Amino acid sequence: MTDYKTAEINITGIVQGVGFRPFLYNLARSLNLNGYILNRGNAGVRLVLQGSSQILRKFLEDIELLKPKISYIENIEVNYLENSQEFKTLEIQESEQGRGISLTLPPDIAICNDCLKDMRNPQEKKYYNYPFIACAECGPRFTTVTELPYDRERSTMIKFPFCAQAEPESCIQEYTDFNNRRFHAQTFACSVCGPHYKLFNKQREILKYDSIEVILQETSKRINEGSIVAVKGIGGVHLVCLADNDDIILKLRKRKGERKYKPFALMVPNLKIIESILKISEKEGELLNSYRRPIVLLERRTPNDNSIISKEIAPGLNNVGIMLPYSGIHHLLFDYIGNKPLVYTSGNKSYIPMAIDNQKIFDQLQDLADVFLLHNRPIYQRADDSVLRIHDDKVKLIRRSRGYVPGYLPLPFEVDVPGAIATGPLLAATGAILRRNRIFPTQHIGNISHLEAFEFLKEALFHMKNLLQINDSEIKFVACDAHPEFITTKFARELGVLFKCDVYRIQHHFAHILSLMAENNVEKDERIIGIATDGVGYGEDGNIWGGEILLSSYNDYKRLAQLEYQPMVGGDRCTKYPARMTASIILNSLGLEESEKIFKKLKLENDLEYKNTELKTLTSQFKQVNGQYPSQNIPLTSSTGRIFDTVSYLLGASKVKTYRGEPAMRLEGMAMKGNPDNIELEIGFTKKDNIYIIKTSDLVIDLISLLGERKFKNEDIAAKFQIEFGKTFAEIAIKLARENSIDKIGLTGGVAYNYSFSKAIKENVLQSGLNLLEHNTIPPGDAGVSVGQLIGGLFKYYNQD
Ligand SMILES: [Zn+2]
Ligand SMILES: [Zn+2]
């Protein structure tokens, strides 16, 4: 036995919660290797195995070949040990608390096909129609785990001890049987020992609890009768109702309060039933079916087919958010409801994070839901459904949450900083944690406009820090937005005091571009021309930025182009009322007298909250400053979002704004029905003090006269505008790239979600022979800003020493 060796093997990556440990055990066993296996938290998995070098080599090769689908191996390190004791058995040892630079925990995983089969098989007594069925390769993870290493006692499943007597095999037997799919699975349970659903009325009285069949019969009956049902799931609670009935959707909108037009997501039992009305590309189908199960925005085939999806689901938009069932309860509900789409929207009041605790669910949804289908498994971390759309082959994440968190972005260079925190922007926010050269964004938080959302941000950040096992003393800096008054900026200052470290304020659009650079592996000393087309961000000159081209390195940026500054008469009200923004631009471009004629023609006052009174105030505010703005009531903005608002308003796509991004989204919906070809519209630019300026005043005047001609359909003008606007950004970016000998142009910011606008930029850049960097893993919108804040902070931190 000269060739007999003892190998110590350390594996890092996503190697916990994906059936990796049982897989290794069975692989080692099949090769007759003895020794042990143990989980070491973020340090990964360690094995010590004895055998001939040939067999050990085979073992290592097979790991890569046969590993469980969702596992991800970052690194395998092998050391051969001298004079080791001899092992007579193969064992899984108790986990230990190891430290590493990564997170070995996967996101929540959709129910797998094997579990689905068991759930539908009447022979499988324990699991038949049991919605919490799971195995080593599927089930909740991130939302359930309280701490690492990943074991049942550090998950919310601790409440449900394994049964010892169930037929045909108890859960203890399954857990300890290496031939079983649930061998060493941590979050499974059965109908004997696991959590259960009950159906409650608003008074919190139990309506049905006897069997899941009875519960589902009653639930589906209520849904079919038009009720809105709160259904607790994996990372939170949904409001569920029929999707084909206008009245029910309108009832839901009314109950949600401030949700007049914002689209609702749907869940469908299978893609077949919507294929005739929605386009599904191969990539979209793949993502919809992936274990992450996000909501994917799918384009309508024919705009007005409302046969199975009510027109009230997404008014004015040409796409609908669709997802497939990802947990047992979803599948079972469709078994009873039938083959039709259901509204499946986050169960929360507008602006408040959804409740995850049963009593709080009752409190929050008291006036929203008619009945409550709730289970008794605690949710540890809230995670909304993720939302994305596809541009050709690239993923544009809008909300990065369930199924994606706690995934990380690797930075394309070495970093020796042990930890840092970013508090994000203010709207559509996430926070993020840096651990050496990895950035871990939190789940989606949303608008930090209410205390509840702020608390959620805090909690999510500290949980992530805890999962990553970062000590307080390892936090070397805190990064935040450049806006001095944001609650997230103030929070960053508090964290700076708490962790005794510096706080760096990073300009919003620079942060967007930094996240894009890292995602695209831009090297440490490289520079790019970054186009940031966005809503709002605090600019270094105190104005509101949002349509910028920045020459960027990781260290710094220089603003080389922008949209012409436009006044926002009455400040933030212009963001809320597209008519007001439009009036401001017209006043700025044409002066008072000419403007008033146009206001009349547009009947603009009708679209202001206080009608004629407001218009009068607006014009007098404008007159008062006599062209001297920015002033207290009239800030300046270069926001791309505000131009989309204005164009959308002028073309009648969006007269009022009821949710963030609505005018731009409706404009896109309108443009999809238009033909840009025969329209003459050029968007010009000029150069002033070495900065290119896109002339938005001229654009608005041109649009008004195009409309006056009445020669073209508004749909056609909308289509033309999006393309032409993109082209202008591209043209300037190409010029700047050439002037500065740079070959990479990047596109980021919330407006980059607009398909034909970004396609125009992409096509023009590629035609010029330059490269275009775009997002695929980090959200282009504000949900990606916290990532950029950390990168910006990191380089400030380095440059300071
Ligand atoms: Zn499974
Ligand atoms: Zn059991």
Image (cartoon, helix red, strand yellow):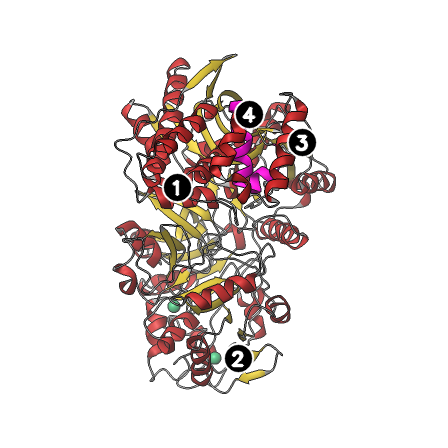
Q: Secondary structure at mark 2?
A: strand
> The N terminus lies in which quarter of the figure?
bottom left
Give, as a three-letter code, the residue at label 2.
Answer: Leu
For the question of whether residue 674 can be seen, the reply is yes
Where does the image place residue 226, in percent across and percent down from the top left? 45, 74
For the question of whether residue 3 can be seen, the reply is no
Give, as a three-letter code, the residue at label 1.
Answer: Asn
Q: Is residue 504 above or below residue 19?
A: above
Q: Which residue is mark 3?
A: 633
Q: CA distance from mark 4 to mark 2?
A: 64 Å
Question: Residue 579 colored magenta?
Answer: yes
Q: CA distance from mark 4 to mark 3?
A: 21 Å
Q: Which residue is mark 2?
A: 199
Q: Earlier in the sequence, mark 4 or mark 3?
A: 4
Q: Which is more foreground, mark 4 or mark 2?
A: 4
Q: Residue at x 51, y 30 (%)?
A: 597
Give, as a three-letter code, the residue at label 4.
Answer: Glu
Where does the image place residue 280, in percent across and percent down from the top left? 28, 53
Q: Which is more foreground, mark 4 or mark 3?
A: 4
Q: Earlier in the sequence, mark 4 or mark 1?
A: 4
Q: Which residue is mark 4?
A: 593
Q: Residue at x 69, y 42 (%)?
A: 491
Residue range of the region highlighted in magenta in the rendering: 569-591
Mark 4 beta carbon near ligand 1 (under 8 Å): no
Along the viewing direction, whichever of 788 and 703 lies nearer the viewer: 703
Near mark 3 (Cα within 10 A), the count class, few <14, some 14-19 or many ≥20, is some
